[in-house]
Image: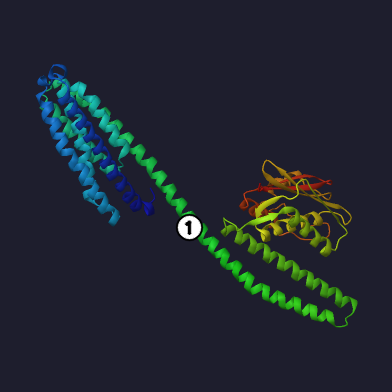
Amino acid sequence: MPVKYKAAYRNYYTLQNLIAVRTCSLIFLVLNIIIRILYLTFPESLTKAENFPEFNFTNWLFIIITPIFTITSYFIIVYYRQNRKALAVHTLYIFAFSIYLIACGVFSSLIATSDPSNALTLYMVPLVIIGVVCVFELYETIILIIGIEAVFTALLIYSQASATDLVYNQMISIILLSGFYLTSRYFYTYKANYYQQVLEIKEKNIEIENAANFKNQVLGMVAHDLRNPLAAVESTAMLMELDEVDSDTRDNIEIIKASCAKARGIITDLLEAARNDDQNVIEATKVDLNVFVRKIIDSWKIHNETRNTFTFSSAYIPLYAEVNREKLHRVMDNLISNAIKFSNADDKIEISLDKENGNAIIEIKDHGLGIPKELIPQLFDRFSKAGRTGLHGEQSTGLGLSIVKQIIQRHGGTIEVESVENEGSTFRISIPALK
């Protein structure tokens, strides 16, 4: 465990140990109560209780002592959650319960069998439980092992075991305690690695959140500090265009206007990408997609300076869906713009509407350049390397299709693409339709 996590991990596993003590003590108390009920319910001729007078005493002893651990654990946990700091008294308390539980198991088995060698089963069970549910530092594990061995030796002497049985049982005890040591260290390492990974993930999430906030601040600056100068340059160019200028100057003015439009488009893409990151839910209204798509196509027919032919077909009239008009309009504009970008001036752009499995299907098909097969998997990635220069010299920011995918996903839909090089591409949008 790295030093920077060590104190936090100790505080974490101390609370987990206290919760484990509360849970184990409660279970042990319930078991003893059940045994007491059975002891009182069944006749002595069946239980042979008269042969085990110590059992009656120890059972009552367990029922009296165990609730002390259960109740104390509750108050310690409440106090701990208020202070969030592990203390030495917490460790001593956990040690006390661990030794108590193991001693109860061994002593109960000694009473039931009068044979120390048969006591090792109930000796092993609480060892395994403590080794798995509780976390101890290395030195704490060693101290606990010494304490357990001392209790086990005392109980062996109490049972008046012979010298031979004493030696054999001590050898087996050493083996069991070795297993306890390995189990304890294994679970310490496992839980430490898990806790470290959780902390590292939290730190990474904080870094990502800070980076996202910084990104939004930068994009805000871009929107504020670049749009105004661009507008000023574009306005100046438009004023110059009103004067009588020679052809070279007019060409330069057109280049300035085109550059401003391109820069404005890049800023818009960046801001749209940031907004889509921050929005999980979009405001939607009921829209007839036939009317909606036709209006977009009519707008492109008017403003499109190329000679591309637009066709529209629909298998369902009307076809309703819950959509955000502005965002879906941006999706259509982006896909139609790409179709024009990678098509020759006289190529046809085909747009169609259909319905399939309760979803409205919008297809935008071109007969242009097509997309290389190896670029399709990267097509919808942000700042994708699949971005290419259009047939008319248009540049790509690598953001457009990633924004399109984000918008469609927020509508609860999907977008797919099919393309063959030099034959064209078909983008297929699927969004839930209204009945």
Q: Which residue is mark 1?
A: 206
Against 297, is 72 above or below?
above
At which x and y percent is residue 6? 35, 51
Q: Locate residue 185: give its quadrant.
A: top left
Tag 1: residue type? Ile
Q: Residue at x 49, y 55 (%)?
A: 205
Q: Locate residue 216: give its quadrant.
A: bottom right
Which of the two residues, 272 or 1, is positioned nearer the viewer here? 272
Q: Locate residue 235: give its quadrant.
A: bottom right
Q: Residue at x 17, y 24 (%)?
A: 41
Which of the two residues, 55 or 88, is positioned nearer the viewer here? 55
Q: Please, what secondary structure does the residue beneath circle 1 have?
A: helix
Which of the two residues, 366 or 20, is positioned nearer the viewer here? 366
In this rendering, the count of numbered labels is 1
At which x and y percent is residue 280? 57, 55
Against 232, is 103 above or below?
above
At which x and y percent is residue 11? 31, 51
Against 11, is 238 above or below?
below
Q: Horizontally, is 358 left or right of 303 in the view?
A: left
At which x and y percent is residue 242? 84, 81
